[in-house]
Image: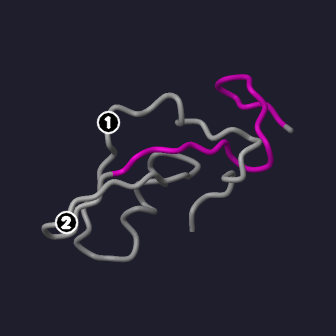
């Protein structure tokens, strides 16, 4: 393990994972999904992939209870 430069908390191999809710708009449809990624920016990229014209935005407020993915959870990998 190595130390995270900002928080002093240990980092596992790779990056600390976060989980955010993202709103996706496709035409008349609007829905929300929870995305796990290495950063908020990457979560928005993941949600927007695949379809041109898909509008994506971060859903506020960010839930502090689920923002950081615990190291022991089975969801440490970023969504593909």
Which secondary structure lies at badge 2?
strand
Residue 32: quarter of image = bottom left
Is residue 2 depicted above or below 73 in this figure? above
Mark 2 neighbour class, 10 Å CA radius: few under 14, some 14 to 19, many 20 or more? few
8 left or right, relative to 79: right
In this rendering, position of residue 14 left or right of residue 40: right
Residue at the top extreme, as displayed: 8
Residue for point 77% across, 42% down: 72
> Number of callouts in the render?
2
Residue 5 quadrant: top right
Quadrant placement of the N terminus: top right
Look at mark 1 in the image and give the residue it sits on: 60
Would residue 55 be counted in the magenta stretch? no
Locate residue 38 relative to residue 4 in the image: left or right. left
Which of the 4 image quarters holds residue 49?
Answer: bottom left
Which quadrant of the figure contains the C terminus? bottom right
Identify the residue under disc 2.
Answer: 29
Nearest to viewer (mark 2 / mark 1): 2
């Amino acid at each position: 393990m190595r130390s995270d430069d900002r928080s002093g908390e240990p980092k596992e191999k790779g990056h600390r994972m976060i989980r955010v809710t993202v709103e996706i708009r496709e035409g008349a449809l609007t829905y929300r999904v929870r995305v796990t990624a290495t950063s908020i920016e990457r979560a928005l990229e993941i949600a927007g992939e695949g379809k041109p014209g898909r509008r994506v935005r971060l859903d506020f407020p960010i839930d502090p209870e689920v923002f950081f993915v615990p190291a022991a959870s089975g969801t440490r990998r970023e969504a593909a």
